[in-house]
Image: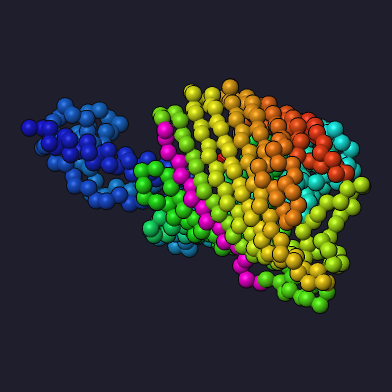
Amino acid sequence: MLAEPVLAHTGKQLRKGLLVGLVGLVGGLGVPTQIALAQTESIPPSDVSSDMPSAAPSSTPSEPAADLPDEDVIEMPEEALPAGNSDGESGTLPEADFAETLNPMSAPFGQQNFVPDIALILDTSLGGRSLENADFGRLRQPLSLRGTDLHHVINAANGFNLNYAELTMAAAVDPYFDLFSAFHLTSFEFEIEEAYFNTRGLPFNLQVKAGKFLSHFGRINPQHAHIWSFSDQPLVHSAFFGNHGLNELGARLSWLAPTDFYLDLGLELLQGVNGSSFGTAGFSAGTQRLPEVNLPNLWVATAKTSFDLLDQLVLLAGLSYAQGGTRLAGSTAATGDLHLHQLGASEVLDLENFAGGTQVAGLDLSLRWFLDSYRELSWQSEFLWRHVGGSQYTEAGRTAWDAWQSGFYSQLLWRFAQQWRSGVRLDLITQNRRGDLTETAVGQPRYSALLEYTPSEFSRFRLQYNLDQTRALDGKQIALHEVFFQINLAMGAHGAHVF
């Protein structure tokens, strides 16, 4: 007979207790408040047994149990309440203000919403190579159309190197946009490496990304240098896209397919100023003048997928294609022939005063095998192919010019302990036909090996060795040996690395 009133009484006490806990939590956050609980229905004394504890126990045990009041008010400590008004009334938090406290996005100009995640990443190294710095700067990379600038690359000099410092900021602007920026600093330059926004919550699993960003072409290109598994880029990437990768102004539209496995399709429209494969600059050759290209000059299509082959074995795959106009202006006036750089006793062809188009296609495959919580074996490989076709302009006229080039890298990494990892990588040129020239350096490899220690998410120590047989100095192929000890440190909040 007593069960129903006792349960009802207990339920009301629980509800009040939960509200008290909520008010305490809000008060702990420094938010003054006074909450009036909803009016509760008193429990008639006749319905409660005299041997049950009273609803409001008194200081004297012999006193009868008191009925619950019609309305209970829970007061916060006096110091937590706002100052009273001129009439001496205690301050209360208006209902609207309390709602904004529980939902920060309803108060978008609150100070806490203006503080982004900020991180600083520092990369430095110590080491050396089998060439003096001056000779290293004269080396040629055979896949490059215009030679390779080796002065500002990572590990550019013998001895100590301050490779870069990267400052990143990221935040959710509002329920509709995320904003990210990365500033790249070296001893030679300061640049906005990335500054873009992403949309949030578009229908049909669509997302728009716009600003300056690293293209999603392939596996390596979208990654910042501190995420790379090795300290330097694969040769084919640095040759086709330069030391800074395919990094452009533009916009990207992506669609995440509603499938039971990951499938992301993307289309990018970019300005196309990348001087290693594309370019928009105008130039003059004799009486001929080609104006610069002002419209977006490059588009990129990507398809990326991943799925589980086994419980602990994951396959990641991607297809990428880029096509755009190519304008390579000359560093000096055209003299009736292709521009030649004098490198000691050799002459190396550079493509200048050229207008045409370029297509680049890529295939990337990755396998990740998770043996347990700490040990992992991962394999990653990319194959890139490029065709450049157009006309070389000189004072005498123009000449048709084409190039077909391709190469790949393949790397294997073994995490044998929670904080230790080792790995090897192979770079190989598979095709390099330029104009009327015969293929050079085809089949010449670069071998790399590393040992890496990662004490935490914020620090990494890496020892890497390279044997590069793709380079030429004074017209002769050489074997370049490199050993570098690299330190990468980060402070502040930074996003998770790409899987």
* Residue toward you, 76 or 202: 202
Give, as a single range, the part of the protein colored magenta: 294-309
At a point 60% along the width and 30% down the height, the residue shown is 412
At a point 36% along the width and 50% down the height, the residue shown is 258
Q: How many marks?
A: 0
Q: Is residue 202 visible?
A: yes
Q: Is residue 224 visible?
A: no
Query: Farthest left residue?
Result: 1
Residue 402: image x %, image y %? 69, 58
At a point 33% along the width and 51% down the height, the residue shown is 36
Q: How is the image coloured?
A: rainbow
Residue 473: image x %, image y %? 85, 42
* Residue toward you, 289 or 244: 289
* Residue toward you, 253 or 299: 299
Q: Is residue 154 left or right of residue 108?
A: right
Query: Farthest bottom residue?
Result: 287
Residue 280: image x %, image y %? 69, 66
Task: Give the main secondary structure of the magenta stretch.
Answer: strand
Image quarter in which the N terminus is found: top left
Residue 35 falls inside the magenta stretch: no
At a point 42% along the width and 33% down the height, the residue shown is 309
Location of residue 334 with respect to 305 vertically, above or below: below
* Residue toward you, 74 or 98: 98
Query: Farthest right residue?
Result: 344
Residue 302 falls inside the magenta stretch: yes
Residue 318: image x %, image y %? 51, 46
